[in-house]
Image (tube, rainbow, N blue to C red):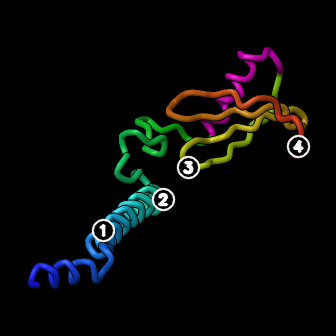
């Protein structure tokens, strides 16, 4: 009789109690980790000189010997001339935080786009379809 009552008490919650509690604990743990990662990498990465807990792997970490915008523009023009043998008379720079994009112009017409990050230039291709100045 005593065993029968114990079996009935254990079946009273349909076996949901312990499994349900673990699911809730795991769910809250995953949510806490996601919130930490989002706050750390989105909010803290926006402050100068910081890139969240992945600072050594981020493109947003400041490079040693950071160049000025004018130096990057001039270097971008030289890179374009050396790579394509074409003349360009002006460059504009857009800073995206993690990298800068250099827009190459000739007579007000946008010719090409370059990216600059960590001391290197990357070719983003011709500026087909993008408006000029």
Q: Which image quarter: residue 89?
A: top right
Answer with mark 3 or mark 1, whichever residue precedes in sequence: 1
Name the mark on residue 64: none
Name the secondary structure under disc 1.
helix
Q: Is residue 120 magenta?
A: no
Identity of the residue drawn at 81% across and 27% down? 88
Q: Are marks 2 and 1 in contact (CB under 8 Å)?
A: no
Residue at label 1?
19
Answer with mark 2 or mark 4, whichever residue precedes in sequence: 2
Q: Residues within 10 Å of mark 1 (few under 14, many from 20)?
A: few
Name the side, left or right, on which 37 lies relative to 86.
left
Question: Mark 1 or mark 4: which is in front?
Answer: 1
Residue at label 3?
97
Q: Which image quarter: residue 57?
A: top left
- The alpha-carbon separation of the residues under discs 4 and 3 comes to 23 Å
- The alpha-carbon separation of the residues under discs 2 and 4 comes to 32 Å
Q: Residues within 10 Å of mark 2 (few under 14, many from 20)?
A: few
């Amino acid at each position: 009789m005593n065993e029968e009552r114990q079996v009935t008490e254990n079946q009273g919650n349909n076996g949901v109690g312990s499994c349900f509690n673990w699911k809730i604990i795991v769910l809250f743990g995953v949510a806490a980790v996601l919130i930490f990662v989002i706050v750390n990498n989105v909010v803290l990465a926006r402050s100068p000189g910081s890139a969240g807990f992945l600072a050594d792997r981020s493109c947003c970490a400041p490079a040693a010997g950071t160049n000025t915008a004018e130096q990057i523009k001039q270097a971008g023009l030289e890179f374009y001339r050396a790579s394509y043998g074409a003349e360009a008379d002006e460059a504009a720079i857009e800073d995206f935080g993690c990298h800068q994009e250099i827009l190459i112009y000739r007579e007000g017409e946008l010719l090409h786009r370059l990216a600059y990050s960590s001391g290197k230039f990357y070719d983003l291709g011709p500026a087909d379809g993008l408006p000029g100045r």
